[in-house]
Image (tube, rainbow, N blue to C red):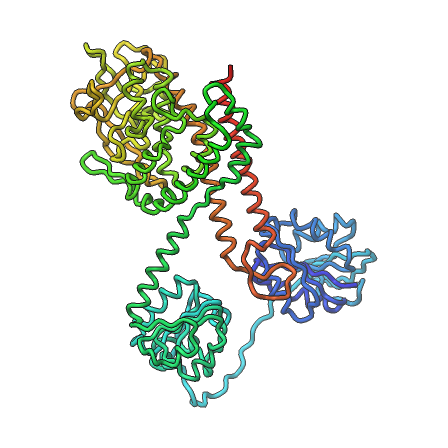
Amino acid sequence: MAILVIAEHDNQSLKAGTLNTVTAAAKLGEVHVLVAGHNAAAAADAAKSVAGVAKVLLADAAQYAHGLAESLSALVVEVAKGYSHVLAPASSFGKNLLPRVAALLDVAQISEITAIESADTFVRPVYAGNVLATVQSADAIKVITVRWVPLPWKSVAVAADPQLSSFVGQELTKSDRPELGAAKIIVSGGRALGSEEQFKSVIEPLADKLGAAVGASRAAVDAGYAPNDYQVGQTGKVVAPQLYFAVGISGAIQHLAGMKDSKVIVAINKDEEAPIFQVADYGIVGDLFTVVPELLAELSNKNEERFMIYNAPVKEIRFVLNELAELTSVCSLPGYEDCSVELVDAILEEAAKFAEGVLAPINKQGDKGATLKDGEVTAAPGFKEAWQQYVESGWVGLRAPADFGGQGMPALVAIAAEEMWCSSNLAFSLAPLLTLSAVEAIHHHASEELKAVYLPRMSSGEWTGTMNLTEPQAGSDLAQVRSRAVPQADGSYLVTGQKIFITWGEHDMADNIVHLVLARLPDAPAGVKGISLFIVPKFLVNADGSLGARNDVRCVSLEHKLGIHGSPTAVMSFGDNGGAVGYLVGEANKGLGYMFTMMNHARLGVGVEGMSVSERAYQKAVEYARDRVQSRAIGSPDPAGVAIIKHPDIRRMLMTMRSQIEAQRALAFYTAAALDRASRHP
C-alpha cells in the first residue's frame, strides 16, 4: 500500500521537516502527501515538485488554515484508511497531531524515528538520545513521527575569477498588468512617442484603462523607451490578443510578424501611408498625442455611464404585486376604485423610465455632495433639475391624500415606485420620503386650517418636509429634548433650539421647507409626556398662500457622511434671532405620538431603502461577474480563464443574493398592502 505523509507548511511553502519525512517514507513505498490548509495551492504545488512524491492530496478549507490538531485529526483519520503508514515530522506540528490520530485509529504511535529497517521495524532514540531502541509494530496502520536535524553547511574553496565579464546592474519591471504573452488586450507604443517619459505618459494610462498589457516596437526598445521584455515582433514576443493597439508604430516587417494574428488591430499613426494600416482592422490617422487623450476621455465617460446604469426590475415587481400582495384585492378597497392593474402597469413603466433615465445618471454628481454657504444649501449638481422633473411628472403626490391634491394611490403602488427611486438614487429618494412622511403626520393630526395651508403644496412637491427630533445632548433619548416653544397672542409659537441629523433640512430644490419640530411648552411636564409637535416653515406663508418673510431658521452645518453625499444632512438652528414662528400640531404635549405617525410611515420606507440598495448591489455584482475573467471552467481541459459567473460557487452566491432580495420585496409589498387594508377596509 502507499504511504501517507502529512505535510507541515505555512500555506505557501513546505517546512524542511516535511522533506525529510518524504525521504524516509520513500523507503517504505509510494509516497502520497496530504496538504491541509487554507488557500494552500502554493504549498501543494511545492509538494508536487519534491522528488519521490507520487501524488498530492489538497484539503483546502478555513478550519485548516493554522494546522490545529483538533481540526486536522478527523481529516487525517478519514484519509488514512487507504494507507499502511501515516508519517509526519517530529515537530510541534506532528507531535500535536499524530497522537490524536493514533488514538482515533486505536493504534500505538511510534515517535521520533531516525531509521527504518523494514515496513514494521524502526529505530528511535530513548533516554535523551543516549540509547537507540529498535521497535516493531503489528498495527494495520502505523502512525509515525520522523525526527530530523538540519545539516550543517561546510565551506569549499572558490575558483579564480576569469574576469571575462562583470555585472553592471539590473532593472526590475514590476507591474500589475497582464503578462504580455497571455494578455487579451495589448497596447504597444513605437518610436514616434519620442521619449521614455512620453511612452509612459501616453501608453500606460490607456493600457490601465483597458486592463491591457504594455508592448513596444523594437525601435522603441532600442531607443530606450521601454524594457526588452516589452518588445513585440520576430525578435521579441509573438502575441495574438483579442485586441491590439499599435500607437505610433510604423509597421516594420519584424513587428508585424509578432502581432499580425491579433483578432482586432487598431492603429494610430499620423502617416496615412504607414504599413501598419495594411494589417489594421481600424485605423486612426492623427497625432497620437491628441488621439490617445481623447480616446481615454471617451473611455472614462463610457465607464462612468456604464457604472450609473440601473435596470428597473419591473417584471419582478409586477409579479410580487399581483401574485403575493394581491393588488386586485387592494384596488377593490373603498377609495381605491380608480386603481386598476392596467393603471399600475402604466405607472410602473413610467417610474422605471424616470428612475433609469433621470435619477440613475446623476448619482456621480450627487456624490460630490450639497454645498453650504452663508446658511444656504445648494443641492448637488443635477438634483434641482431632477426634482423639478419629478414634481412636474406628479410623482410626489402618488400616495398623497386626494382631497389635498394628491393622487391617493394605495401604499402598495407607491412602495413599488419608491423601490425604483431608492435603487436608482438613494440620496435623492430621501427628499420625497421625508416629505410624504410629514404629509402623513399633518394629515392625521393637524387642524383643518394647517392642512389647507401646507398639504396641497407638499403633495405637489412645491414644498418639501423634514423630521426634527433629536438634539446634540439627547441622542435617541427624546426625553432630553430642550427645544422650547413659547405661545404668542396670535396663536402661533416662537420656537428656539437646535436639531441634528436633519435629512434634507436645507436645500434649494423646493420653494419652501416645512419642518416638523419636537419642542416643549413653558409649562410642559418633564420627559416624553411634555413634548409637542410644531410646523415651522422655512418661509412664512401669507394669508393668500404666497410666501412671505424668511423664518428664523438656519442651517448651521452639514454632516460629513461616508455615503449618500447627495442628501444634505443638516444641523438646524431655530430662533437665533428671537424665535422661529411655529404652529402647534394637534394637542399640546402629544407631539411624540404624532411624530410616530411620521416615524411609522418612514420605517417601511427605510426598509424599502435597504431592499432597493440590495437590488442595485446585486445588479452590479452580476455585471462584474460577467466581466471578471479568472481561472478555467471546472472540468474544462482549456486552461484559458472564463468569466467568474461560470464558476458554480459564484452562481450560488448570486442566486443567494437574488433570493434574499425577492424575499425582502415580498415582505415590504405585503406590509404595504396590510397598511392599505388597515386604513381602508370597512
In which quadrant will I find the N terminus? Answer: bottom right
Left or right of 553, for residue 595:
right
Foreground of the two, 124 or 51: 51
Q: Residue at x 34, y 33 (%)?
A: 431
* Residue 166 higher or lower than 665, as above or below: below
x, y (%) of residue 6? Answer: 67, 58
Image quadrant assignment for residue 133: bottom right
* Residue 623 higher or lower than 678, as above or below: below
x, y (%) of residue 91? Answer: 63, 57
Foreground of the two, 140 or 219: 219
x, y (%) of residue 217? Answer: 39, 78
In this rendering, does residue 580 appear at all? no
Left or right of 278, for residue 290:
left
Q: Residue at x 30, y 36 (%)?
A: 388
Image quadrant assignment for residue 490: top left
Number of labelled discs? 0
x, y (%) of residue 401? Answer: 38, 22
Left or right of 292, for residue 342:
right
Foreground of the two, 111 or 130: 111
Foreground of the two, 16 or 208: 208
In this rendering, does residue 606 appear at all? yes
Q: Residue furthest right?
A: 138
